Image (cartoon, helix red, strand yellow):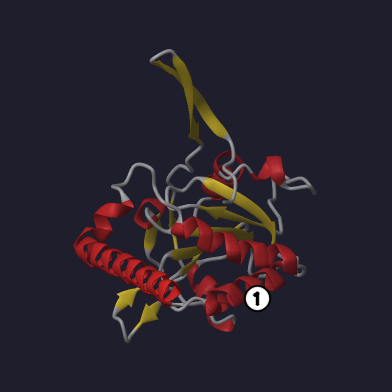
Amino acid sequence: MPPHYFADSVISKVSEGKTTTDTLWHTVGGIRLINQLGDTVSLDQLRGRVIIADFFFTHCPSFCPSLTRNLRKIQDQIKTRDDMKRVDTSFVQFLSFSVDPERDSPQVLKRYADRYGINPDIWWLLTGPKKTIYDFALQELKLGLVDGLGVDSNFIHTQKMVLLDRNHVVRGYYDGLDSADLSRLAYDMVLVALEKDKNSRSALADLKPLLPLFFLVIFGTTLAVVWMQIRRKKSGEYL
């Protein structure tokens, strides 16, 4: 599984003479911004979804368009609705934060989104107070600690993408211009989406209605194997 990053604290417990430790990993704090549709949205709305985040600005002359195109490739690989089974499989949300929010209004972001084929159902382009966005990038996502090129706190311009799990704990940093890293991001995205929450009920509870069938299959298979062994033994005696 992808690793966890940035422990907030480690709790030690002694039970029956044995010491166990439980790490409390840094959970990204909430943030409220405006998306390309002009809607005020928050990270709290996305609890239970895997998050992939990056930072860009619409008039970027360098690598931002490539970041967007690469993230679009991952978007296009996700089938957000299975019409045959009628199961909602939208387990991920993409968040692209503008680092130049003064110029990137919702209207500007909408034109950018339309140009790159961005699906607003699972991908928000976000604008708002610059300090709010920069504090989130540096203090919550810890980009200043992981970007090998260094992040300027006055103008964040990074090609890193960040993966958050369903509890919004940082699970990875990826070079958005590197094909191998992008493949790893897509793979890790699925892994953390399937990861079992230790605080949720047992997976066995979800399978409880099928347990009689499982036991019937196991019992039937066991009988069949025993019967075949008996037949083989009798055949050997006749020979």
Left or right of 223 on screen, residue 98:
right
Q: Residue furthest top?
A: 17
As displayed, is residue 72 above or below residue 147? below
Image point (30%, 48%), residue name: 202
Q: Residue at x 49, y 25 (%)?
A: 21
- Say which residue appears at 71% left-offset and 55% top-offset: 157
The answer to which image quadrant residue 62 occupies is: bottom right
Q: Please report the residue visible at 73 percent of the width from the left and 48 percent of the height from the top.
A: 147
As rendered, which of 154 and 199 lies closer to the eye?
Answer: 199
Q: How many marks?
A: 1
Q: Residue furthest bottom?
A: 84
Q: Relative to the observer, which residue lies in front, 228 or 38? A: 228
Few, some or many residues within 10 Å of mark 1 (<14, 14–19, 20+): some
Residue 140, image x, y percentages: 54, 41
The residue beneath circle 1 is 69
Whether residue 114 is visible here, answered yes or no, is: yes
Which residue extends farthest right? Answer: 149
- The type of residue carrying mark 1 is Arg
Image coordinates for residue 73, horizontal then vertical, percent = 61, 77
* Towards the viewer: 112 or 193: 193
Q: Position of residue 4 (x, y in %)?
A: 57, 42
Q: Is residue 153 visible?
A: no
| Secondary structure of the residue carrying numbered label 1 | helix
In percent of width and height, residue 72 lies at 59, 75
Q: Give above or below for 22 relative to 129.
A: above
Q: Is residue 109 above or below residue 149?
A: below
